[in-house]
C-alpha cells in the first residue's frame, strides 16, 4: 500500500512538474501576506501593509516581476492562530496564490511552516523571530528572508560588551510570552558565555500588555543594576521606557532595548541619550550606508507622506521579502530559458539566493535561513529630530553571529568563550557621518 | 524583606489600587442598580483614555497651559458618560432589562466589540501617550526611590474623594436616595412615584463617566493602546466579584487588597504577579461565595 501511494505521489509529482514546465505567464502573480492589522502588534502590521502596497505599486509600475503584475491579499493575524490557518488554506487553495508571506507572530510561523509544506506553497517567514523552526525541522517550501532571534540577541550582547565592558549587574523586564522568555534565554546564555562574572539581579516578566510597571521600576531603583534589558516592543516598550524615564530610572541604569528602533519616533524625548537600541537587522531610516542613496531617501519621504511616520523594521522586512520574491522569480525565469517558471522551479531558485531590500544584502543559507547583518547603536539627541536617533553604531557580520547550520542556538551560544568578542568583525558608524 | 522594601511595595500597591478602584466602582454601581454586568465598561475606560490623550495632545501642541490637563480629565469623563453612556442605556439596555442575564451579558459584550472597532477607526492602532498631567506635578524621592507625585499622592487622593463623594451622594442627596430606593426595590419605588427609568439613565451615565475618568487618569501614566479596555474589564470583574456585586466600599477594599497583593508579589515572587488578583478572588469566593461584602439576598417571589 505504501509503495503504491509513493508511486502515485511520484506520478502526480511528475505530472505536475511536467505541467509546470509548460506554465503560461499568468495575468497576475498573487501573494498572500499575513500581518497584524488589529491588536497590539498592529504597530508592526499596519506599517508593513502600507509598505507592501507602496512597493508593489512601484514594482508593478516598472513591469512587475518578469512582466507580470503582483497582487497582494492580506490576512489579519490579530484574528488568532486558527483563523490565520483557515485563511492561509483559503488563499492557497481557492485564491491559488503563488507565494505566501507569513508571518509576524512566531506562534503563527510555527503553525504555518508545516502547512506550507503540506500545501507545497512557497512561504517566506518575513518577520517572525523564533530561531527554532529551522533548527528543529527542515523544510523545502519555507524560507526566512530575514535574521532570527539568535543573531539579534547575540549582536546585542556583543554591542553591550564592546561599549560597556565593565558592567557588573543586569536585570531583565520582558513580556510574559514566548518571545519575552525565549529572547531572555538566548541573551542570558550568550552573556554568561561571554562574560561569566556578570550578576543577574532581577528577572521580571510582567503580563503582556501591562499598563503599569511602577512596582518593577521601584524595585529596579532600589536594586540599581548597571544594565536593564527589555526585549519588549510596541505599547509595552513605550510604556516601560516612559515610566522609567519619568521616574529617573534612565539616569541610574543603561537600558538595552533590542527592538526599540520601532519605538524611537513614538517615544520622542522620553528615551534620553545613552541607551542601547537594536534594529532587528540593519533596519534604520538613517541607515549609515543608505541615507545618501536617493532611492532610499525617496522611499523614506514617500512612506512618511503616506503614513505620517518614519519607516520601521517591519517595513524593511517587507522590502526584503518582496525583493526575495522578485529575485527568485527572475532567477527561475533565467534558468527556464526566459519562460515563466513552474512553482517548483521558483522554490529551487531560492537556494543560495541573495537579495537586497532597503538595507544590506541578505543571503539564504542551505537551511533556508536568511543571513543578515546586525546594526545597533546608542541614542543621542540630534538636530532635526524631536526623538532620539542612533550614534556610535556598530554593524555586525551576519555570518558570524548567526548560529551555524545544523547547530541548536542555545547549545551553540553556550560553547562560546569570551575570546569570541575579539574575533567578530565590526564596522563602526557615527550619526552625522 | 526589610522595612524599606515593605514601604516601597505599599506605595506602589496603593497607586495601582487607586486606578483599579476607579473603574471597578463604576462597574459595581451599574450592577447594583441596573443588575447588568456591563462588559462595555472596559470600552468606556479605553475611550476615556483615548479622549484625554488625544484632546490633551492637541491643546498642548497648540500652546495652551499644561494645567488644563486636570480639568481635561473631567471633560473626558463627562464626554464618555453623556455621549456614550446615555445613548447606550436609553436606546439599547432599556430594551433588555427584562431579558435573561446571559442575553444581557451578550448584548453588552457586543457593544464592547463594536466599541473596540470604533476605537481603531477613530484613533488607529499606534499607541498614544500624553503625560502632561503627570509631568506637571513632578517627582518625589522616598527612601532613595523616585516616585511621581501624580501616582503616589494625586491618584490615591482622587480615589478617596470619589469614594467619599459617592457615599455622600447616595446617602445624603435626593438623587442618591432615589438610586438607593430603586436598587432596593424597583417595584415599590416606582409605585411611590419614583421615575425608575430616569434613575437607571442617571446611574449608567455616572458609572460610564467613572470608567471614562479612570481611563483619563490612567492615560497620563501609560500608553493608550488597542486592547487596554479588555484587560481592565477582566481585572475589574475580579475586583467586583471579590467585593460582592454592587458593593462600593467593598470595591475600594478589594482594589487595595489586589493592588497590594500585586506589588508585594513583584518584590517577593515576580512569577505570581499576574495570578495574584485571581488567587485573591478564588480564596475569597471559596470562603464567601457572595463576595467579601456581598449580602445573601432573599429571593423575591
Image (tube, rainbow, N blue to C red):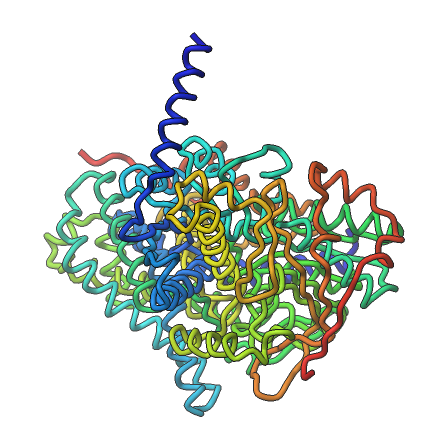
Query: For residue A361, what is the image quadrant?
Result: bottom right
Foreground residue among A82 and B78 = A82
Residue B251 position in % (x across, y down): 44, 53
Residue at the spot 67% in from the left edge and 61% down from the top edge = A374
Foreground residue among B199 and A159 = A159
Foreground residue among B57 and B195 = B57
Answer whether residue B47 is visible to the viewer in this image.
Answer: no
Answer whether residue B279 is visible to the viewer in this image.
Answer: yes
Name the residue furthest top.
Answer: A1
Residue at the spot 41% in from the left edge and 65% down from the top edge = A55
Q: Is residue B137 left or right of residue A403?
A: left
Residue at the spot 58% in from the left edge and 39% down from the top edge = A133
Residue at the spot 45% in from the left edge and 10% down from the top edge = A2
Q: Is residue A233 left or right of residue A203?
A: left
Query: For residue A412, what is the image quadrant?
Result: top right
Q: How many marks?
A: 0
Foreground residue among A136 and B102 = A136
Residue B12 position in % (x across, y down): 62, 61
Relative to B201, is B150 above or below?
below
Residue B178 position in % (x across, y down): 22, 60
Figure quadrant of the C terminus of chain B: top left
Name the residue furthest front.
Answer: A337
Residue A195 position in % (x across, y down): 86, 53
Q: Is residue B23 left or right of residue B187?
A: right
Q: Is residue B274 left or right of residue A75?
A: right
Amino acid at each position: 500500500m505504501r509503495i503504491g501511494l509513493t508511486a502515485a505521489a511520484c506520478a502526480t509529482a511528475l505530472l505536475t512538474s511536467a505541467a509546470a514546465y509548460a506554465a503560461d505567464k499568468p495575468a497576475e502573480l498573487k501573494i498572500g501576506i499575513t500581518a497584524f492589522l488589529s491588536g497590539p502588534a498592529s504597530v508592526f502590521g499596519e506599517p508593513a501593509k502600507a509598505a507592501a502596497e507602496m512597493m508593489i505599486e512601484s514594482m508593478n509600475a516598472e513591469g512587475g516581476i518578469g512582466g507580470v503584475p503582483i497582487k497582494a491579499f492580506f490576512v489579519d493575524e490579530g484574528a488568532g492562530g486558527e483563523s490565520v490557518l483557515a485563511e492561509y488554506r483559503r488563499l492557497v487553495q481557492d485564491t491559488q496564490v503563488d507565494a505566501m508571506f507569513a508571518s509576524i507572530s512566531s506562534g503563527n510561523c510555527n503553525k504555518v511552516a508545516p502547512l506550507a509544506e503540506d500545501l507545497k506553497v512557497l512561504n517566506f517567514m518575513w518577520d517572525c523571530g523564533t530561531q527554532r523552526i529551522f533548527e528543529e525541522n527542515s523544510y523545502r517550501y519555507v524560507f526566512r528572508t530575514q535574521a532570527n532571534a539568535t543573531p539579534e540577541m547575540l549582536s546585542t550582547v556583543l554591542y553591550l560588551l564592546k561599549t560597556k565592558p565593565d558592567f557588573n549587574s543586569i536585570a531583565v523586564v520582558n513580556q510574559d510570552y514566548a518571545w519575552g522568555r525565549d529572547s531572555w534565554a538566548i541573551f542570558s546564555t550568550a552573556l554568561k558565555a561571554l562574560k561569566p562574572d556578570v550578576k543577574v539581579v532581577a528577572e521580571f516578566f510582567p503580563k503582556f500588555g501591562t499598563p503599569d510597571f511602577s512596582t518593577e521600576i521601584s524595585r529596579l531603583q532600589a536594586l540599581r543594576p548597571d544594565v536593564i534589558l527589555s526585549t519588549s516592543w510596541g505599547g509595552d516598550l513605550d510604556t516601560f521606557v516612559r515610566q522609567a524615564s519619568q521616574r529617573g530610572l534612565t539616569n541610574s541604569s543603561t537600558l538595552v532595548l533590542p527592538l526599540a528602533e520601532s519605538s524611537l519616533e513614538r517615544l520622542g524625548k522620553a528615551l534620553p541619550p545613552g541607551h542601547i537600541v537594536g534594529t532587528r537587522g540593519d533596519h534604520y531610516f538613517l541607515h549609515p550606508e543608505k541615507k545618501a542613496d536617493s532611492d532610499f531617501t525617496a522611499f523614506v519621504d514617500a512612506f512618511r507622506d503616506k503614513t505620517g511616520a518614519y519607516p520601521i523594521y517591519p517595513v524593511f522586512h517587507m522590502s526584503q521579502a518582496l525583493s526575495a520574491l522578485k529575485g527568485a522569480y527572475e532567477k527561475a525565469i533565467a534558468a527556464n530559458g526566459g519562460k515563466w517558471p513552474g512553482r517548483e522551479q521558483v522554490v529551487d531558485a531560492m537556494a543560495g539566493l541573495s537579495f537586497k531590500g532597503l538595507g544590506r544584502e541578505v543571503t539564504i543559507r542551505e537551511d533556508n535561513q536568511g543571513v543578515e547583518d546586525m546594526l545597533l547603536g546608542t541614542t543621542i539627541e540630534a538636530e532635526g529630530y524631536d526623538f532620539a536617533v542612533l550614534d556610535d553604531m556598530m554593524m555586525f557580520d551576519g555570518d558570524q553571529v548567526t548560529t551555524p547550520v545544523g547547530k541548536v542556538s542555545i547549545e551553540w551560544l553556550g560553547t562560546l568563550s569570551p575570546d569570541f568578542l575579539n574575533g567578530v568583525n565590526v564596522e563602526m558608524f557615527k550619526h552625522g557621518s | 524583606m526589610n522595612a524599606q522594601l515593605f514601604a516601597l511595595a505599599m506605595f506602589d500597591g496603593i497607586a495601582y489600587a487607586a486606578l483599579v478602584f476607579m473603574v471597578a466602582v463604576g462597574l459595581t454601581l451599574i450592577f447594583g442598580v441596573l443588575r447588568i454586568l456591563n462588559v462595555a465598561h472596559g470600552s468606556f475606560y479605553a475611550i476615556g483614555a483615548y479622549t484625554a490623550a488625544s484632546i490633551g495632545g492637541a491643546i498642548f501642541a497648540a500652546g495652551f497651559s499644561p494645567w488644563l490637563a486636570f480639568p481635561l480629565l473631567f471633560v473626558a469623563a463627562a464626554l464618555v458618560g453623556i455621549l456614550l453612556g446615555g445613548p447606550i442605556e436609553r436606546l439599547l439596555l432599556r430594551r433588555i432589562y427584562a431579558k435573561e442575564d446571559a442575553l444581557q451579558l451578550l448584548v453588552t459584550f457586543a457593544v464592547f466589540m463594536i466599541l473596540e472597532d470604533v476605537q481603531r477607526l477613530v484613533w488607529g492602532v499606534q499607541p498614544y501617550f500624553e503625560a502632561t498631567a503627570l509631568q506637571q506635578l513632578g517627582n518625589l524621592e522616598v527612601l532613595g526611590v523616585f516616585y511621581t507625585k501624580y501616582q503616589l499622592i494625586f491618584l490615591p487622593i482622587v480615589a478617596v474623594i470619589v469614594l467619599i463623594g459617592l457615599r455622600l451622594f447616595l446617602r445624603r442627596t435626593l438623587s442618591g436616595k432615589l438610586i438607593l430606593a430603586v436598587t432596593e426595590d424597583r417595584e415599590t419605588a416606582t409605585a411611590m412615584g419614583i421615575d425608575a427609568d430616569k434613575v437607571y439613565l442617571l446611574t449608567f451615565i455616572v458609572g460610564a463617566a467613572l470608567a471614562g475618568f479612570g481611563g483619563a487618569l490612567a492615560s497620563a501614566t501609560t500608553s493608550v493602546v488597542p486592547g487596554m479596555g479588555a484587560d481592565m474589564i477582566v481585572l475589574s470583574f475580579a475586583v467586583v466579584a471579590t467585593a460582592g456585586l454592587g458593593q462600593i466600599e467593598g470595591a475600594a477594599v478589594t482594589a487595595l487588597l489586589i493592588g497590594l497583593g500585586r506589588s508585594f508579589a513583584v518584590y517577593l515572587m515576580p512569577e505570581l504577579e499576574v495570578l495574584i488578583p485571581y488567587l485573591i478572588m478564588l480564596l475569597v469566593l471559596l470562603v464567601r461565595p457572595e463576595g467579601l461584602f456581598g449580602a445573601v439576598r432573599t429571593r423575591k417571589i
